[in-house]
Amino acid sequence: MSEEEPPAGESPDPAPRPADADRQDERKPKDRGEPADGGRRESDRATGDDPEQDARDRAERERVESRFAAVGSDPREEGEDTPVDAAATAEAHRSARASFDIRRDQHNFHRPEFQNAHFGDVNLRLDAQRTAVFSGPVPEDELLRLRRVYQQPDGFEELAQSLRSRRLLVLGGARGGGRTCTALVLLDRMTDPDQAGSPAPPRPRVSRLDPRTAPAELTGTELEEHGRGHGFLMEIPESNDTALMPAEVHLDALAAALGACDSYAVVVVASGAATTTMLSGRYGRLCPDAPADRLLESRLRERLEDRPEGRWEDLPEGPPGAAGGLSEAVALARDPEVAAAVGLDELRPREVERLADLLAEHALGTLPRDGLLARCRELADHQAHEWFAGLDREIGGESSPGVPSAATLMYPAAFRVALSVFHGSTHSIVAEAANALAWEMAVAREPERSPARALFCDDESVTLGLSRAALGEGHVLVADVPVPVRTVRFRGTALPTAVLGEVWTRHHAARPPVVRWLRSLADDPRPQVRVRAAVAAGELCVRDFEYGYEQLLRPMATAAGARRRMFAATALDQVVRHDSHRSAIRALIRAWARSDSSSLRWTAAVALGYGHCTARVGSALDLLARIGLRNDGEHLAVASHSTVLLAAGSDDMAVLRRIGQWVQGRRRDRQDQDLGLLSVARLAATRVGEIWDGEASPDLADYQKWPLALALATAREGRTVPVADLLWHALQVLRSRATVTASLEVWLRRACSEEGEALFTGLERLLPLLVDDDEDRERLRWLINRMVEDEDDPLPAGQARRIWRAVESRPLTNTHREKERV
């Protein structure tokens, strides 16, 4: 010791040598029951006269010792060369589960046909059954209605000024964002006879041109046929065929022709790589977001009004016949349960209108609350359907140079699927996974062509806008240290589930490339990739378990690689969380636990550790013991790891009692004892953050860096003595003593650090219970002295004295300990 003073009390004896500490005396413990090996402590076997027997004994000891040497690693990663951050794996599992709503019965996924698809981008309609005009003149009453209900967004006046001065406006935006409605309102204002000071024209003021009309083909003569002061709306299809994309010179010619006949035109295009040049030119503008709150209130006023000819400004708060007034309907839209059912952060005009219709029906008493919530959940499903319906109809071939190839057109769809799987994850992971999935989809769509993707044409803002995604800031764990990263997520918690359900349920031809993609992700060394992919695979299996089992679960569960088997176990845990599949999955896990297949038993053991594959924790422990003890302890490591996972759950006392029974077992082959001792060693070596599940153990949230054994003893009442008894038994057995002692050393060093005061307090309660006699005390003193004399990282003398005072504090009486024993 640096001050030449040992930490052991007033006049301690010199620290015993390691050989003395390993001395085994046959004795009866005073209060702990019989040791783990049936009444005597284990000792090194003396070398006999049989060399072959000695060799077998040494091999057996090395095999047993190797089990305990690996308690600090995750047995679910056996055979993998890349080291794995267990805490990062646990965090990825928690965040992946949070992306999906398991409260909904996903296997009965149902949605009516998308009623609004034929409306295009007309986001405000007369009522729920009213259709919009596709081509030809726009009726005057439609323009009047738009004028009445339209809510101007920020930036509307700038759009109007640009159209007035240049006669032509190229308006870009995502589908459903109100761009067509804004274009019609702009044209209505430019051609309004009241503003022009002239009588109303005998013919319509605004016309909608055929979508197949190329702006470059319009001539002044064609425009003059509609008369002067006319407004034209042109919508370029979202396939972004380059043959329909006008160059700047064509737009200049069209603007001159419009000026000659005193007319105006708005060209509506989708934001994308093909329209970037148009939108960045002198005529291009992005459509601003609609004011959802004002639009909702306006639509509610219209729906709740009983007098079609009356002024909506004079509508009373509670119209006759309504179950609630306008203010109650508006407040209901902000209700947390309704907002959660909608699951979209920012509603687009079409969705605002649909939500207003539902709220009005509820306010008028025709739609109960349960029906309202169910219909609100369809909004995200409608968006997903719109994204994927008929996506590949416009894919061109080698003879269609103006039409995008499969690889180009599939990327936005692949990005949405990848974002559903990695919602809230690192943006680079999502983009990388999207490119891989786009390649798989392109191969499936055009097997005769070799997919290719341009390297420098990605427009990040366009991709995010078309997918209703947003960038954010987050972190990833690197050696337990959070590192800032740029993340990406949907603007709405309902979209991940809706997108996966849409692709899997309605587009069966897309399943094979998605399955191949998920299988490839299972081999990724990054836990945030393969764990999230496994959770998403479980969600897909819920919707069609027969297909998912044959294509994903069974092949992965019987694979040679541990990561693929863990993929299957994680997916099964996600499936079993759904009530509709719980009984079937539990029966499947029981069958796998009894299977002759080593791979299936291993997968079952991992799945049991999550705590949902049996109705009671005792049943899970029975199956884990069966798996761990079979074939000479082939799967002892993974069985003990799953036992520790269960110990971190809410029913930890049942687990601690079962481990105590295993530790004190008397089987000749000692496999049950090894299962118990391995479990104790993992309790001591595993940190809470490596296995923490916020659902199963929310009370351990503040103990992320603590060893699990000490966290249980500190955070939960009545666990100190049971945990101490288990540690004491493990310290009495030679094959587990070194591992547990090494864990105690880690505890002590951490407790003596600057941030370890709380941990030190827990140790002061636990350490005295590890001492039953002088030999136990000498063993701890030897450990403390060795830490003090460590040349590289010596333990401070003051901290050593404090630790030793805790060790020598008065232990519990026999009566007290018997009351609190496991």
Image (cartoon, grey):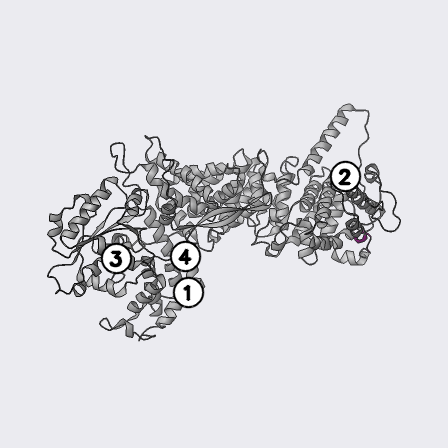
Residue 791 - label: 2
Circles 2, 1 touching at the beta carbon (< 8 Å): no
Q: Which residue is mark 1?
A: 334
Whether residue 361 sits left or right of residue 20 in the image: it is left
Rendered image quadrant of residue 304: bottom left
> For numbered disc 1, what is the local secondary structure?
loop
Number of the front mark, 2 or 4: 2
Q: Nearer the viewer, residue 571 or 765?
A: 765
Residue 123: x %, y % from top left: 28, 57
Q: Are marks 2 and 4 in contact (CB under 8 Å)?
A: no
Q: Can residue 214 be seen by looking at this rendering? A: no
Q: How far apart in space, not on screen, are marks 3 and 2 (Cα)?
A: 78 Å
Neighbour tally class for label 3: few under 14, some 14-19, many 20 plus, Cα within 10 Å? few
- Quickly name the residue at label 3: 161
Given the image, on which type of amino acid does mark 2 rest? Answer: Glu
Q: Which residue lies under the disc numbered 4?
A: 345
Cα distance in 3D space between marks 4 and 1: 12 Å
Give the magenta part as a residue range.
Answer: 805-809
